[in-house]
Amino acid sequence: MPDSKNSDVKSSHSPDFNLFRAVEIFMAVAEMQQVTTAARALGMTQSAASQHLKNLETAFGVKFIDRSHRPVTLTHAGGILQRHGFRILNEIEDLKANIRRLNATTLPVLRMGLLASIATTLTPGLFDFAVNELGVPELILSAGLAIDHRSALNARQIDLAVTSELVQSDIDDHVIPVLDESFYLVLPESYDGDPADIEEISARLSLVRFGVATPVGRRTDQHLQRCRLHFPRAMEADRSSMVVAGVVTGKCFAILTPSLLIDAVAEGMKLRIEPLPFPGFRRRIQVVTRNGEHEEIAKALARQCAQILRTHFAMRFPAIAGEVDYHFPALADPAQD
């Protein structure tokens, strides 16, 4: 039988404390590198914060903070705890958000992933729409690529995504098309050659492109291979602003859609946009959520995205704006707004 006396002695040396609160305090100290400053930020005394840290170290039998340095530094064990601490605090925040959803009559928080190329264009209008029309008090936005949205939806880190065609689209996806857009030839504004002569273009300029790890880069490569086109390449990037910046140097051309160009044009980058001098291809912008979750909200947001983009395309690309096909035919005419 276990020695009850020894068990009592062991338990008496185990501090009775709130583990989560101690980790929270440790994370604040690790961030601010001062116990006093962290305690003040957490609304507690320096002695109380120190006691929590002491209890934490006693419980694990290791030192997490090296107090011999000013500002304080983390020990090797402290670095490990910090990495776990980020995950613990994030999980608690996710738990709180999910419980609020269960108890709320309206959605308290909407987490949305946006394509990086249109995030700046969409954000003001989506924020106003979510708050004023959907009654969502808090909107959490994150910008990324379609592959980022796929993993974030699977991990339930976002509720829906405004994205392009997803890689390995899941059978549980609920997809609402927003628009279909063509790819165009994007040349430096100063290019004085014939935009229909792709041989001359490729002789004078190099292709700046999205990397093959990105969905749009893969789509472009596949289309060029189908057309038996092989261009000299100068640069790869994973953001449209970087691709367009390559064109602005005057040494490159690109193959992009209006949604991939909108932020760059809004920033004043000077470009020459022409039809492709070879068979064209298109891509789709869509809103994706999980089946049975937020489907009505997704539909309303898809329509709002279409309206926002239609207005901006008409303003930034009047010559080609009419070539974008929207999946909401009753949208207001931007010219009348």
Image (cartoon, rainbow, N blue to C red):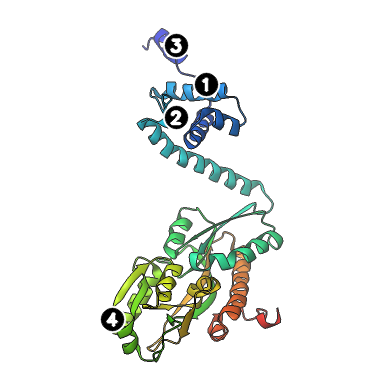
Percent of width and height locating residue 281: 42, 82
Q: CA distance from mark 1 to mark 2?
A: 16 Å
Percent of width and height locating residue 307: 63, 74
Q: Looking at the rendered structure, which numbered label has been put on residue 230?
A: 4
Q: Marks 2 and 1: in contact by CB < 8 Å?
A: no
- Quadrant for residue 129, please give it: bottom right
Residue hosting label 2: 72
Residue hosting label 3: 8
* Helix, strand or loop for disc 4: loop
Q: Marks 3 and 1: in contact by CB < 8 Å?
A: no
Residue hosting label 1: 51
| Res. 170 in view | no
Q: Marks 1 and 4: in contact by CB < 8 Å?
A: no
Name which of mark 2 and mark 4 comes first in the sequence.
2
Q: CA distance from mark 1 to mark 3?
A: 23 Å
Percent of width and height locating residue 317: 55, 81
Residue 186 lies, with reference to residue 195, above or below; the image says above
